Image (cartoon, rainbow, N blue to C red):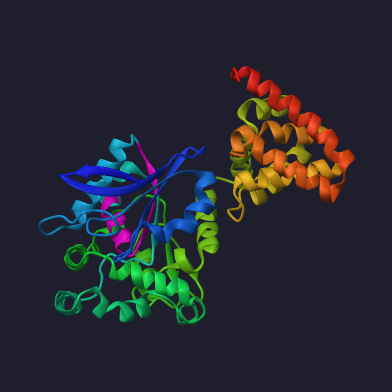
Amino acid sequence: MQFININGKAIHYKYLKGNGERTFLFVNSLGTDFRIWDRVVELIRSEGSVLCFDKPGHGLSEEVDGPIRISDYVQLIISLLDMLQIEKCVYVGLSIGGLIGQHMALKHSERIEHLILSNSAPKADAAEYWKTRINAIRQGGMASLSDKILERWLSEDFRNNQKIETAGLKRMLESCSTLGYIHACEAIRDEDLSNEIHAIAIPTLCIAGSEDNATPQERVEATAAKIPNAKMVVINGVGHLPCVETPQEFVQILLDFLASSNGSLNERGMKTRRAVLGNAHVDRAEAHKTSFDQDFQEYITNNAWGAVWARPGLTKRERSLLTIALLTAMRYEDELAMHIRATQNTGASEEDVKEVLLHTAVYAGVPATNGAIKIAKEIFNQKNASHGK
């Protein structure tokens, strides 16, 4: 577990260093902790580093003593980024996390590369709504409203068919500190950025759930309409927590947005190709490219690396091991050697490759696997020798 001291209070966070250049910052919703991003983090970690944290009074973070404002949450994030020496992040905020992101984009735009606002708006429900909710929580505790809140959070289909996950989310909500929850409610109640978000100049994506009863689709659409050039995506059939209900679709939407904001499919493919095979290999391949194979190389970069390897459904480690198994079965030894060398970039270990080749021997035959083992041994022996092992 990782903690940081913010104004004398222990704030719980998780920082996972990745191979990619980006850092993804995930900021969760009211009444939840950063476990709601677990599946998303699994899918996106191969794309860069990941940072999550629990707001004060949520998860394992301590409560603050007095009232808290949205600007205080922003300052907490700035302190966390500074401590970890992260200059910029891809900011992904859900509900209040999105509201915090809007404030940060207006006041600290230099720290955000791209802004993703999931199920969020610049102004929440009327003050009277928050007064009623705060009073109910003060009198009856979190459990008094947990069932009603889950109805706002989750689609009916998810509640009916994912009862264990729903029960777990209910337990998460009811474990939230009453004071921490009330402080966050008050911060939401007192923030209104409706007349300011037109000044957000960061590439922005707004995501809505068609079954969201907390921040309905039309409010997210109105938010996107106010932010210059913001893109809007609606995920059908999900509620307020698409990162929980449909994490793979959520990640694909996020990565597609980043790709569209950062250039063509070819540029995305080249970035992925370099991340997997290494700059030295790609530079050599590009130097030897001629007019004869230029179209073929572009095809490979676009379709293999840009359209398939860059997808979030499998991690780069998983794709690496799958590729090694297939190349072994097909006896494509040159390509196999290239991808075994690439394991130093994909996170696949020598032990992983050993297990994959043993498995491949059962289904693709011993002769093919024997040749692959010879190649792998030579590469790993060279690697270990260079590292003094």
In the displayed structure, would residue 55 be above or below residue 344?
below
Foreground residue among 384 and 245: 384
Where does the image place residue 138, in percent across and percent down from the top left? 14, 74
Where does the image place residue 11, in percent across and percent down from the top left? 25, 49
Q: Quadrant of residue 223?
A: bottom left
Instruction: Name the side, left or right, on which 354 lies relative to 74.
Output: right
**Is 252 a magenta residue?**
no
Q: Quadrant of residue 317?
A: top right
Foreground residue among 58 and 367: 367
In the displayed structure, would residue 195 be above or below residue 215?
above
Q: Residue at x 37, y 76 (%)?
A: 216
In the displayed structure, would residue 71 be above or below residue 166?
above
Where does the image place residue 111, in percent across and percent down from the top left? 33, 42
User: Which residue lies most toward the right here?
Assistant: 367
Instruction: Name the side, left or right, on which 140 lies relative to 376.
Output: left
Q: Residue at x 40, y 58 (%)?
A: 35
Instruction: Name the side, left or right, on which 156 lies relative to 187.
Output: right
Kindly tell me whether residue 89 is visible in this rendering: yes
Where does the image place residue 282, in percent across and percent down from the top left? 67, 30
**Is 97 a magenta residue?**
yes
Foreground residue among 362 and 41: 362
Q: Residue at x 31, y 69 (%)?
A: 173
Kindly tell me whether residue 293 is visible in this rendering: no
User: Which residue lies most toward the left here?
Assistant: 66
Q: Quadrant of the C terminus?
A: top right
Residue stretch rendered in magenta on the structure: 86-104
Foreground residue among 47 and 144: 144
Q: How many marks?
A: 0
